[in-house]
Amino acid sequence: MVYYFILGGIIIQDIDIVREILTESEYSIVVAKNGAILAKKQGDGIRPIIEAIDELKRDMKGSTVGDRILGKASALLCVYAKVAGVYAPQATKTAIAVLIRAGIPGQTDELVPYIKSRYEDNICPFERMLSDIDSPEEAYRVLKKAIK
């Protein structure tokens, strides 16, 4: 089942682009803007999206991010980067709520209750780290420090 939340305009084209790349590759993060691919990253956790934000800087603003698994951490980073849209094959309700509050449209194929840790024995450590954080700026600082 596909879940849409507030879609429109060029964002649909970019969502189609990032969805296709995520489906046909091993990339973790894909960033597209106005039909062009700005970045494709592989890796675990939130490192790939932080790398994309740090490399693209202001070019992230207005882009569409494709993230293999969207949790609160990734959603807050998307808000921080001022993206225009998000696609994720899997997303949590918390992540979607973060995007909706920020007015960022997106699409997911599957709602999951939480993001699992790498060993699938607990909740993702980045999600736990941000359980009491709602500020995108603070989330970026905390997550950036955590991956160093």
Image: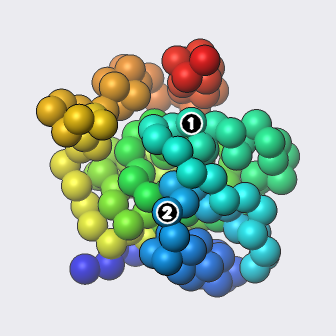
Q: Residue furthest right?
A: 58
The span from disc 2 to disc 1 (Cα, nearest Å) is 15 Å
Q: Which residue is mark 1?
A: 47
Q: Position of residue 103 (x, y in %)?
A: 55, 56
Q: Nearer the viewer, residue 102 or 54?
A: 54
Numbered mark located on residue 115 in the image: none
Residue drawn 18% across and 31% down? Answer: 122
Residue type marked 2: Glu
Q: Is residue 80 left or right of residue 57?
A: left
Asked where in the image residue 86 lies, by quadrant, the reply is: bottom right
Q: Position of residue 77 (x, y in %)?
A: 58, 40
Q: Describe the element under mark 1 as helix, strand or loop.
A: helix
Q: Residue furthest left?
A: 121
Residue drawn 70% across and 46% down? Answer: 52
Asked where in the image residue 53 lies, by quadrant, the reply is: top right
Number of marks drawn: 2
